[in-house]
Image (spheres, rainbow, N blue to C red):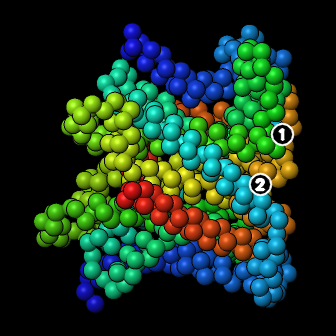
């Protein structure tokens, strides 16, 4: 065998073994687990499609899916509007531009666990910062995390605060690719700045918007530490997320088969949602 | 005048992102009586919150665990990952095509799908409560290999030929010829990997139950859930969160440009 082929095999063999054990095996085994009931202590037993049937009739699972859509319905538009606005502001001659950008980006680099604990303090009903500010304005304390109707929107706002800096940078890169001449041309036709933004800038930023929507959607379906720390999935299970429910099935109830079934279902839902989003944003282009 | 209004709006927006962190830092030094207040200067600064959280849970140990785990993963991803990227980019060997395809395919699989099967694997291997469980499943990273491979593909052929004529082996070519040229992508991969490992919390919550082995975000989560509610419990939690936040903010203050560019480039390439 040639020396080059031998070196190539040697250098990539550990990675090939890694892929086999920690990527391909888990992917294949996830399908096997769907058919099993297994507490990791006693031997697994084959139960056919019991897990799938259970999933279809499981009100908690569907509640978690609905909760995620509630989260996304608030989080996605908020994220796009705030990111776009702040990117638009930053995309002009400014003093201390890199300072402003770094300020908006700071929460992105902080661990989700730390950000969530910080927000548990901001949202606290009695000693929280936000209710403290509201009290100065003579507004009553809001039970941010204990009112079933408010808790998930509150988490969506927190997630936006945490991630928006990342999307500002994405939009900023997109805005810098929009040629000045495009705006000048349409403004010569008598368009206002707002019309120029709506008809020139926004369509040109479609790739960035698609990226924001895709990554935020995947992030939304990964929601875990936020409800785990803030609410435990309550009140009335309104903040229960699929990953939190999956974690509990595996870690607290030792139901590996059902937890894996939740994982497979979640992967399929994410794929379906992303395909639909791509279609919708893609067709907006043709219109 | 319009410009002034513009800067006021900008400052208010920036305050919405910075003030909570400053308030957290201030509150961690406040007494229970003061902790709900809006002020950024404690009337009577106290270290009591830090003493409490340090005494109640092994945060020093968790800090070392997190540093060890994140550093080991980052070194592995850089050193071994770039060897794989080099082989995939510049060496022809049987199986290269399939490895390239698998590397891309793996990125398309949602992490939620493999979480539980990987957890059962770790349990079967007897790795629960071990550093191996925290490190080995992250020892390689497909995204990192793709970023580095993309860069290695652009290194001129003549450099490799010259190095080979000098009798250099592949590893020497990689680490003495390619690495010095690849500082930017290596920094990107290094920052992304370290941040990901440092911030990860779901995986440790699954595979580690022994307090002595917990990473910082995990111990923080466990500590905060066990601490109860109310002002007396709040300040020690914030003090504990500070242990996790301060090293990152310190690194960010010096390297913010690299942080932002690394993360943005991962987003646009991914």
Q: Helix, strand, or loop for circle 2?
A: loop
**Which residue is located at x 28 percent, y 43 percent?**
A177
Point 34% across, 81% down: residue: B97
Q: Position of residue A270 (x, y in %)?
A: 59, 65
Is A123 placed above or below B174 here? above
In terms of depth relative to the viewer, which is nearer, B217 or A32? A32
**Can marks 1 and 2 be said to lie on one chain?**
yes
Residue located beneath label 1 in the image: A146
Letter of the chain that mark 2 sits on in the rendering: A
Q: Position of residue B149 (x, y in %)?
A: 33, 65
Residue A139 or residue B150, whichever sits in front: A139
Q: Is residue A126 above or below residue A152?
A: above
**Residue B256, position as x, y percentages in the image:** 43, 35
- SS of the residue at dot 1? loop
All told, the count of numbered labels is 2
Can residue B45 be seen at all in this image of the molecule?
no
Q: Is residue B257 above or below residue B37?
A: below
x and y percent of residue A279 in the render? 47, 64
Q: Quadrant of the N terminus of chain B?
A: top left
Q: Residues within 10 Å of mark 2 (few under 14, many from 20)?
A: many
Residue A62, above or below B193: below
Query: On residue A240, which mark appears?
Result: 2
Query: Quarter of the image holding residue B167?
Result: bottom left
Q: Residue at x 28, y 60 (%)?
A: B151
Which is nearer the N-term, disc 1 or disc 2?
1
Question: Which of the two residues, A245 or B189, is positioned nearer the viewer here?
Answer: A245
């Amino acid at each position: 065998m040639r020396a080059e082929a031998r070196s190539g095999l040697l250098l990539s063999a550990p990675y090939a073994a890694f892929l086999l054990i920690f990527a391909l095996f888990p992917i294949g085994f996830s399908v096997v687990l769907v058919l099993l009931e297994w507490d990791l202590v006693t031997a697994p037993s084959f139960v056919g499609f019991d897990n799938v049937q259970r999933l279809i009739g499981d009100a908690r699972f569907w509640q978690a899916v609905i909760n995620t859509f509630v989260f996304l319905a608030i989080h996605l538009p908020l994220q796009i509007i705030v990111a776009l606005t702040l990117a638009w502001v930053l995309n002009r001659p400014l003093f201390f531009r890199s300072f402003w950008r770094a300020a908006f980006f700071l929460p992105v680099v902080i661990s989700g666990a730390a950000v969530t604990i910080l927000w548990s303090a901001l949202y606290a009903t009695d000693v929280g910062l936000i209710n403290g500010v509201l009290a100065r304005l003579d507004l009553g304390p809001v039970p941010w995390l204990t009112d079933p109707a408010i808790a998930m929107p509150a988490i969506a706002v927190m997630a936006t605060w945490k991630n928006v800096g990342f999307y500002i940078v994405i939009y900023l890169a997109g805005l810098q690719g929009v040629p000045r001449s495009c705006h000048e041309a349409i403004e010569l036709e008598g368009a206002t700045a707002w019309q120029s933004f709506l008809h020139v800038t926004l369509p040109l930023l479609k790739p960035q918007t698609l990226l924001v929507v895709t990554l935020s959607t995947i992030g939304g379906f990964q929601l875990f530490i936020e409800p785990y720390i803030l609410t435990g999935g309550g009140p009335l299970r309104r903040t229960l997320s699929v990953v939190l429910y999956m974690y509990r099935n595996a870690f607290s109830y030792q139901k590996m088969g059902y937890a894996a079934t939740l994982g497979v279902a979640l992967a399929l839902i994410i794929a379906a949602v992303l395909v639909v989003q791509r279609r919708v944003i893609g067709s907006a282009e043709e219109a | 005048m319009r410009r002034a209004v513009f800067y006021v709006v900008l400052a208010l927006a920036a305050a919405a992102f910075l003030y909570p962190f400053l308030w957290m830092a201030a509150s961690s030094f406040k007494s229970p009586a003061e902790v709900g207040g809006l002020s950024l200067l404690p009337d009577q600064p106290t270290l009591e919150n830090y003493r409490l959280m340090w005494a109640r849970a092994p945060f020093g140990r968790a800090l070392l665990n997190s540093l060890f785990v994140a550093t080991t993963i980052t070194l592995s991803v850089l050193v071994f990952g770039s060897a794989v990227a080099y082989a995939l980019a510049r060496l022809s060997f049987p199986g290269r095509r399939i490895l390239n395809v698998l590397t891309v395919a793996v990125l398309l699989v949602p992490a939620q799908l493999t979480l539980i099967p990987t957890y059962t694997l770790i349990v079967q291997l007897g790795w629960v409560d071990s550093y191996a469980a925290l490190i080995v499943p992250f020892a390689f990273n497909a995204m990192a290999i793709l970023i580095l491979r993309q860069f290695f593909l652009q290194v001129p052929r003549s450099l490799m030929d010259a190095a080979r004529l000098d009798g250099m082996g592949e590893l020497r070519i990689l680490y003495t010829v390619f690495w010095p040229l690849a500082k930017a992508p290596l920094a990107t991969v290094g920052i992304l990997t370290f941040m990901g490992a440092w911030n990860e919390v779901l995986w440790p919550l699954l595979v580690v139950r022994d307090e002595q082995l917990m990473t910082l975000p995990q111990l923080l989560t466990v500590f905060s859930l066990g601490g109860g509610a109310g002002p007396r419990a709040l300040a020690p939690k914030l003090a504990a969160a500070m242990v996790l936040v301060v090293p990152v903010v310190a690194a960010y203050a010096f390297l913010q440009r690299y942080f932002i560019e690394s993360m943005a480039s991962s987003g646009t390439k991914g």
